[in-house]
């Protein structure tokens, strides 16, 4: 059975994935991953904004949606400079993070608790993006892609700022969620 799996996996790589042989190839592969992540996020953020109970949180998600569209456009600019296409890869990590976010939206939770859950999901996304943009910025720097370094650094700084805004929002929303718990009637234990 293992031999079949290995043979199938090897065949799959040969058919679907070009060989990665140097840092430039790694850079392009990682840029494609980020582009996929951003395009998935563009679809998810409106749902998160709609699910938020706090008007400030909803507005923050809407503002980040516009910023995310700019991030995707910057990546497209980098791809044009590399004479590469941004498509062809699905970011499985973002797919999973968005799935978790969708589950959060469906949670049966009080308003502030729901917002606290949304912030937690959004911060996981931001931390993933911060790691990704920091990595590709380093690759761009090593490869002498000066214009890309500037664009990637701009996006990285915006992702860090968004994470900081989410942390700030969480400080008050988490307190509200705790207060909701204190105000809720204690569950009865009937036998």
Image: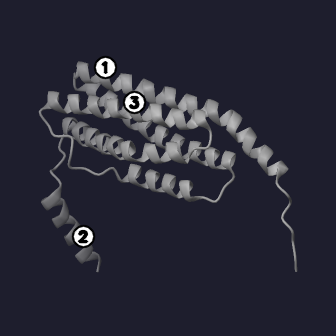
What number of labels is visible? 3
The C terminus, quarter of image: bottom right
Q: Label 2 belongs to which residue?
A: 6
Distance (Cα) linking label 1 and label 3: 16 Å
Query: Where is residue 187 shown, x and y percent of the image?
Result: 83, 64
The residue depicted at 54 percent of the width and 38 percent of the height is: 58
| Secondary structure at numbered mark 1 | helix
- According to the image, label 3 marks what residue? 67
Q: Secondary structure at mark 2?
A: helix
Residue 82 or residue 74, whichever sits in front:
74
* Residue that mark 1 sits on: 150
Say whether residue 73 is left or right of residue 92.
left
Q: Position of residue 40 (x, y in %)?
A: 35, 47
* Badge number at residue 20: none
Per the model, the C-alpha gap separating discs 2 and 1 is 41 Å
Q: Give the quarter of the image for residue 9.
A: bottom left
Q: Residues within 10 Å of mark 3 (few under 14, many from 20)?
A: some
Q: Helix, strand or loop at disc 3?
A: helix
Side of 59 where 168 appears, left or right: right
Q: To which quarter of the image does residue 166 belong? A: top right
Q: As displayed, is residue 3 above or below residue 110?
A: below
Query: Residue, x 82% and y 54% (percent of image)?
Result: 184
Q: Earlier in the sequence, mark 3 or mark 2?
A: 2
In primary-sequence order, the first of circles 2 and 1 is 2
Mark 1 vs mark 3: give the one in front.
3
The residue lying at 36 percent from left, 23 percent from top is 153
Give the percent coordinates (x, y) of residue 182: 84, 49
Q: Earlier in the sequence, mark 1 or mark 3?
A: 3
On the rendered image, what quadrant is the N terminus found in? bottom left
């Amino acid at each position: 059975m293992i031999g079949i799996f290995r043979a199938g996996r090897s065949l799959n790589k040969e058919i679907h994935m070009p060989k990665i042989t140097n840092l430039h190839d790694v850079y392009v592969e990682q840029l494609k991953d980020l582009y996929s992540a951003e395009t998935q996020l563009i679809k998810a953020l409106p749902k998160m904004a709609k699910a938020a109970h706090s008007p400030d949180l909803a507005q923050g998600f809407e503002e980040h949606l516009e910023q995310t569209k700019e991030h995707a456009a910057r990546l497209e600019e980098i791809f044009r400079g590399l004479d590469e296409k941004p498509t062809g890869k699905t970011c499985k990590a973002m797919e999973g993070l968005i799935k978790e976010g969708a589950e959060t939206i469906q949670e049966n939770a009080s308003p502030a608790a729901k917002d606290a859950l949304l912030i937690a999901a959004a911060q996981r996304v931001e931390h993933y993006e911060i790691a990704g943009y920091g990595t590709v910025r380093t690759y761009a720097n090593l490869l002498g892609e000066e214009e890309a370094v500037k664009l990637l650094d701009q996006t990285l700084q915006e992702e860090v700022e968004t994470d900081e805004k989410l942390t700030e929002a969480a400080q008050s929303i988490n307190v509200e969620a705790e207060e909701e718990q204190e105000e809720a009637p204690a569950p009865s234990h009937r036998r």
